[in-house]
Amino acid sequence: MPKHPIFSMPFAKVYPLYVQKAERKGRTREEVDRIIRWLTGYSPQHLARQIDRQVDFETFFAEAPAFHPNAALIAGVVCGVRVETLEDPLMKKIRALDKLIDELAKGKAMEKILRS
């Protein structure tokens, strides 16, 4: 089965869209970064490096230091797809991140977004 096109898309191309979405709703780049770091285990420096290197989504998640164990609690619909029913592990991670950014843009409290 061929890979989904998003897998080879540079994370750095989508990152500004995450930030724009959050900022349009009164949230901040720092909150977006906090969500990404929580989910992936990247430090601020490593996240910046991944963006500078223009790594694709597949590499971004493959090199993530530690996918958060509470990521399994991320559920709901994003892009018309129910996150918890996705079978492809990479697509599930990508859509989980999309879902968290959606929750941020919808005004959810950071503690709930981070499943604390």
Image (spheres, rainbow, N blue to C red):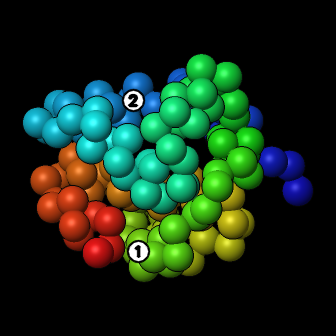
Q: Residues within 10 Å of mark 2 (few under 14, many from 20)?
A: few
Q: Residues within 10 Å of mark 1 (few under 14, many from 20)?
A: some
Q: Determine which residue is flagged by label 1.
A: 75
The picture places residue 89, in percent across and down from the top left corner, at 69, 66
Can you see residue 14? no
The picture places residue 64, in percent across and down from the top left corner, at 64, 51
Please give the label number shown on residue 97. none
The picture places residue 54, in percent across and down from the top left corner, at 65, 23
Q: Which amino acid does the dot numbered 2 rest on?
A: Leu
- Dot 1 falls on a residue whose secondary structure is loop
Name the residue at 44% across, 48% down.
36
Please give the label number shown on residue 17. 2
Q: Of residues 103 and 61, which is closer to you in this image?
A: 61
In the image, is residue 96 above or below residue 30?
Answer: below
Say which label, 1 or 2, has the lower sequence index. Answer: 2
Q: CA distance from mark 1 to mark 2?
A: 22 Å
Q: Quadrant of the C terminus?
A: bottom left
* Dot 1 and dot 2 residues touching (CB under 8 Å): no
Answer with the quarter of the image where residue 114 lies. Answer: bottom left
Q: Of residues 109 and 96, which is closer to you in this image?
A: 109
